Amino acid sequence: MNSMRRGVTAVIIEDGRLLAIRRSQQVSAPGAICFPGGGIEADESETDALIRELQEELGASIRPLRRLWENVTPWQVHLAWWLAERVPPVDLKPHLPEVAEFFWFTPDEMAAHPDLLYSNREFFEAATRGEIKLG
């Protein structure tokens, strides 16, 4: 049985901007900027985990659209990256124990952010290489 931890990440694009969060000081990688998401529980599918995590972190109802990419972080977490949309796009409410704040960045702004989480930097590098199609 594979004991590698599994996680899921939501890539939500609205008006050409990406939804990003700043992780709270109470979670791993405190203060890092990243796409929202989290761990997949043993009995969950990737899409079920994505829906649950976005509800928990931001109070957002989302619809997963398609799997964009996958990678393994240096911390041995297998991440599945999903394009998703908010349904409906209501105001976001960060769950402060997990999320300090949220942002809408252009892809260039997010990719260049000094606090960007390493795995998210890998995502942008893969997109630059043409491995990920956002459109």
Image (cartoon, rainbow, N blue to C red):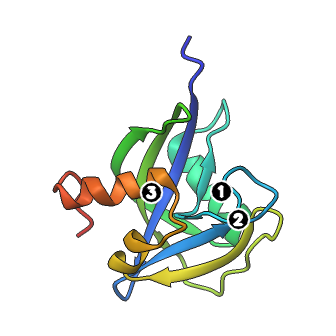
Q: Which residue is mark 2?
A: 57
CB of mark 3 within 8 Å of CB of mark 1? no
Q: Quadrant of residue 98?
A: bottom right
Q: Are marks 1 and 2 in contact (CB under 8 Å)?
A: yes
Which residue is identified by label 3?
A: 120
Q: Residue at x 79, y 62 (%)?
A: 25
Which numbered disc flags the more N-terminal residue, 2 or 3?
Answer: 2
Residue 105's place in the image compared with 118, above or below, is: below
For residue 37, above or below residue 73:
below
Could you tell me the amino acid type at mark 3?
Asn
Whole-percent x, y for residue 99 in the image: 72, 68
Q: Residue furthest left?
A: 130
Mark 2 or 3, closer to the camera: 3
* Real-space CA distance between mark 1 and mark 2, rounded to the nearest whole angstrom: 6 Å
Say which residue label 1 marks: 53
Q: Percent from the top left, x then y, of residue 12?
A: 45, 71
How many angstroms separate mark 2 from mark 3 (CA)? 18 Å
Q: Residues within 10 Å of mark 2 (few under 14, many from 20)?
A: many
Residue type at mark 2: give it. Answer: Glu
Q: Residue at x 27, y 66 (%)?
A: 134
x 39%, y 72%: residue: 112
Q: Helix or strand or loop: what does disc 3 sit on?
A: helix
Helix, strand or loop at label 2? It is helix
The quadrant in which the C terminus is found is: bottom left
Crowdedness near tag 1: few (<14), some (14–19) or many (≥20) residues, C-alpha within 10 Å: many
Are there few (<14), some (14-19), or many (20+) residues within 10 Å of tag 3? Answer: some
The kind of residue on which mark 1 rests is Glu
Question: Does residue 134 appear left or right of residue 36 in this picture?
Answer: left
In the rendered structure, find residue 39 and report the number of the disc placed on it.
none
Residue lying furthest front in this view? Answer: 114
For marks 3 and 1, the one nearer the N-term is: 1
